[in-house]
Amino acid sequence: MSDYDLILVGAGHAHLGVLRRWAMLERPSGRIALVSADTHAWYSGMLPGLLAGRYSAADCSVELQPICRAAKVELITAQVESLSAEQRQVQLSDGRQLSANWLSLNVGGQVAPLAQQGDAMQCLAIKPFASFLASWQTWQQSPKPIAIIGGGAAGVELALALADKVPRLSLFCAGKLLAGHNPGLHLRAIGALRQRRVRLREYSPISRIEDDQLFSQDELVWRGERALLATGAQALPWLEQSGLACDARGFVQVLPTLQSCSHRQIFAVGDCASLPGAAKSGVYSVRQGPVLASNLMAALHQQPLKNYRPQKQSLALLATGDGGALLAWRGISAGGQVYGYWKDYLDQSFIRRHRFSG
Ligand SMILES: Cc1cc2nc3c(=O)[nH]c(=O)nc-3n(C[C@H](O)[C@H](O)[C@H](O)COP(=O)(O)OP(=O)(O)OC[C@H]3O[C@@H](n4cnc5c(N)ncnc54)[C@H](O)[C@@H]3O)c2cc1C
């Protein structure tokens, strides 16, 4: 017999939506737990604002105990170290092994480490946020030049947030800056980076670190003591080792019902899942929340499941570190303070929606 009817693994955006819905409406019957590595769920969209000094850490995270209590879900604070898909069993960092009839995974991704020789350069990955923020506080006490590696939305937002806090900031991008976004946003981001004196290098994939030097292929491109890694999401290794069907990058392949293609009693959502048309961004994870909540309810009560259909376009709002934001929607781009107010409103509404008292 299983320990639980359902275990939610990871307090990602979609699971927060599930908990909120169950707290406000009806929750499926049975014993349900959330396993989370942290006592709080961090909202990545506000992290650049926190680094720019516009938010406090408490503004950017949701405390999990109150929302779990409201949803009548047991909170287990531990890291999942491995998963057996066949047995639907998770091994926790505190030594416990838990099994469930149903599992739902919303664990996000990790930042790929870079090959490094020597320890003259400190490398700090942007995720997990809690450990990033702890190290960042130490760095802040003695500001030094920093190289940011990763020219996606996260890398650009970080560079703009930190431009005034670091003596010299360089941003390295494997290909074109903000690849996949419209050309207008690309130009606006270059303009904003230039204005803030961030040195940008596009088409410079960093291949290795040797002592205090960054190399792109065999070219020495930067020397310094600190690098921030903001490259895209890489799959957590235990997902592929679990026996779940995964894509070539190690993300869990799911059906439109958000069930694993190989193990129907396991759901996966957000960045850890692989579904054609669904991008790895918080926006898609948030939108999967209501479908997941309804499908978990249906699954536990042996009812038919719904399909999730990824939106074709999503709005991008990139914080510029000064209270403003750059916007991209379909082929249109814009920038200014008014978009910053809009972004703040959307981000703060997300936090408010998931914050429960008690
Ligand atoms: C600086 C920055 C800014 C960003 N800004 C935006 C933005 O404005 N808009 C946007 O759409 N996207 C943004 N993103 C991308 C966004 O962060 C991710 O796409 C999004 O967080 C993915 O959400 P998720 O629901 O898959 O999981 P996540 O939000 O990554 O949450 C995963 C959860 O799982 C937990 N977890 C992980 N491993 C384990 C484990 N082994 N055991 C237990 N728990 C575990 C983590 O603690 C975390 O709570 C940004 C990213 C960064 C780095």
Image (tube, grey):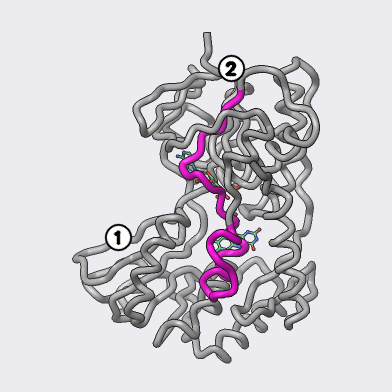
Asked if 140 appears above or below 3 in the picture, the reply is below
> Which residue lies most toward the front here?
358
Q: Which mark is residue 151?
A: none
Quarter location, residue 295: top right
**Which residue type carries mark 1?**
Ala
Q: Is residue 152 visible?
A: no
Q: Position of residue 61 (x, y in %)?
A: 58, 54
Q: Identify the residue at image location x=56%, y=49%.
A: 41
In this rendering, would 300 be left or right of 92? right
Question: SS class of the residue under badge 1?
Answer: loop
Query: Which sits earlier in the primary sequence, circle 2 or circle 1?
Result: 2
Q: In the image shown, does 38 or 262 lie closer to the viewer?
A: 38
- Neighbour tally class for label 2: few under 14, some 14-19, many 20 plus, Cα within 10 Å: some
Residue behind mark 2:
101
Boundaries of the magenta span:
32-60
**Which residue type carries mark 2?**
Asn
For the C terminus, which image quadrant?
top right
How many numbered discs sit on the rendered protein? 2
Q: Tell whether circle 1 marks a residue whose Cβ is less than 8 angstroms from ligand 1.
A: no
Q: In the image shown, does 73 or 98 lie closer to the viewer?
A: 73
Asked if 336 appears above or below 284 in the picture, the reply is below
Contact? badges 2 and 1 (CB < 8 Å): no
Q: Which mark is residue 115?
A: 1
- Neighbour tally class for label 1: few under 14, some 14-19, many 20 plus, Cα within 10 Å: few
> Which residue lies most toward the top here?
1
Question: SS class of the residue under badge 2?
Answer: strand
Q: Position of residue 354 (x, y in %)?
A: 69, 47
- Quote the CA–CA distance across marks 2 and 1: 40 Å
